[in-house]
Image (cartoon, rainbow, N blue to C red):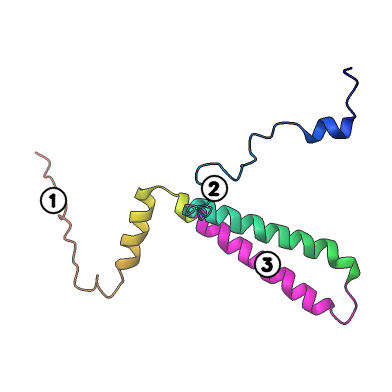
Amino acid sequence: MAGKIRKSRKASARFDPMARTPAAPGADQEIEAPRQLSAHQQRHLERKRLQAEAEALKNKRRKVSKANKLEHKKQKKAISRELKTLKQVSKQAASNSKSACGTADAANASPASLKDFTFVLPTPQRMDEG
């Protein structure tokens, strides 16, 4: 007699490919530490974290008491400042190597180092009319 199976019983017996059995090879080993993220990924995660924090502060705005209003404003400004600096760092990291080299050379060339530099231009000579 093959009757219908209840839904709860049917759902519990489904195969889960991600489930690990205790007898699976490598089950006794610890789970590996997460791999090291690249600089780009780290900046991205940091930016997303700051944006979420800013959004949480924005949602909390109506719940802030009058006494804590200034502190709330300072927190908002600090987060927006961090976001701006993070965006600037991202832009600098994304720029190509030529512009990065050009800014490094310009920074090293101070006016004191150019003090003894002379540039001689040829003087134009007058051509006689003949």
Q: Amino acid at mark 1?
A: Gln
Q: Position of residue 90 (x, y in %)?
A: 52, 55
Q: CA distance from mark 2 to mark 3?
A: 43 Å
Q: Does the magenta run of residues contain 81? A: yes
**Which residue is label 3 attached to?**
79
The number of numbered badges drawn on the structure is: 3
Q: Position of residue 11 (x, y in %)?
A: 81, 33
Q: CA distance from mark 1 to mark 3?
A: 64 Å
The C terminus appears in which quarter of the rendering?
A: top left
Q: Which residue is at a point 90% across and 20% down the rendered structure image?
A: 3
**Which residue is label 1 attached to?**
125
Q: Which residue is at a point 67% across and 64% down the rendered structure image?
A: 80
- Density class for disc 1 (Cα within 10 Å; few <14, some 14-19, many ≥20) is few
Q: Secondary structure at mark 3?
A: helix
Report the magenta residues as a range.
64-91
Q: Position of residue 114 (x, y in %)?
A: 24, 70
**Which residue is label 2 attached to?**
27
